[in-house]
Amino acid sequence: MSNASDEMSFLDHLEELRWHLIRSTLAIVIIGSVAFIAKDFIFDTLLFGPKKIDFFTYRLFCELSQSLGQGNSLCIEEMPFRIQSRTMSGQFSAHLWTSLTAGFILAFPYIIFEFWRFISPGLHSNERKNARGFIFIASILFFIGVLFGYYIVTPLSINFLGNYTVSNEVFNDFDLSSYISLLRASVLSSGLIFELPILMYFLTKIGIVTPQFLKTNRKFAIVVVLILSAVITPPDIASQVIVTIPILILYEVSIFISKVVFKRQQKELKNV
């Protein structure tokens, strides 16, 4: 009887998880449908914005170089490439998957809410109280990461790769799916990387990491960060430094959060 009860309890958890996933998927599809309708804004303004020379980031770098007395050294004068679609379903597929990606990004707070509803019953009342604001903080960090990926990582990558050439005989004609994949990877990876403090919070709560562990392995973390920056940015030093700095700051913030959580746990153990 006990085994049957335990098995039913496990199946109940699976059923509960299934409904959380279904509701999250529905949220992505509904918001994605709205994005699908707003095709002109999504593509002409957002997706193809970073390939225009008057994009916000390019103007900012240009003004920065001029204010530092470097003239127009950081100004973008042209984007010598075109975007094309070479398959029959290329544009429709790009439209569909881009809409779903937009749906995931905009529905992220609700997805986190569903995740929280699933795990919160397993937490003590004081743990739920201490984690108050989790959805808001996780969402803010994710959106900051998305903006960082869109306004920093994406333009740096597009500018470098769009202007890179091995010969004047070769003209850059980028496939639509390749361009969107670059932008999607830059935005989503940055958004998820900015969730590092949240991840460290939970890993500390369940005892997998400690603040001392994070401090001791800081030098290895720096190497990982450098590798990660090299993966999501073009292979020039300036771009990698620009991306590495905020990730290192996030790592230090994660150490601080881990320390706070660890001290709180030690205090609770002493009071038991």
Image (cartoon, grey):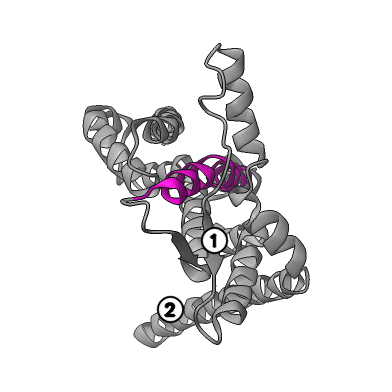
Query: Quadrant of the rendered structure where residue 112 is?
Result: bottom right
Whether residue 258 appears in this view of the structure is no
Q: Residues within 10 Å of mark 1 (few under 14, many from 20)?
A: few
Location of residue 270 with respect to 179 vertically, above or below: above
Q: Distance from label 2 to label 1 (Cα)? A: 54 Å
Is 15 placed left or right of 113 in the picture? Answer: left
Q: How many marks?
A: 2
Q: Provide residue 175's location: percent of width, then percent of height.
A: 48, 69
Q: Residues within 10 Å of mark 2 (few under 14, many from 20)?
A: few
User: Which badge, 2 or 1, is on the more N-terminal residue?
Assistant: 2
Whether residue 55 appears in this view of the structure is yes
Q: Residue drawn 37% across and 59% down?
A: 170
In the image shown, does 80 or 203 lie closer to the viewer? Answer: 80
Q: Residue drawn 49% across and 44% down?
A: 159
Give the residue type at disc 1. Arg
Is 36 placed left or right of 188 in the picture? Answer: right
Main SS, magenta region, reads helix
Quadrant placement of the N terminus: bottom left
Q: Which residue is mark 1?
A: 82
Q: Which mark is residue 161?
A: none
In the image shown, does 127 or 72 lie closer to the viewer? Answer: 72
Q: Secondary structure at mark 2?
A: helix
Q: What stretch of residues is rendered in magenta?
A: 140-165
Quadrant placement of the C terminus: top left
Q: Residue drawn 47% across and 58% down?
A: 182
Q: Residue furthest top?
A: 69
Q: Which mark is residue 10?
A: 2
Q: Provide residue 129's location: percent of width, then percent of height.
A: 61, 43
**Does 272 lie within the magenta span?**
no
Give the residue type at disc 2. Phe
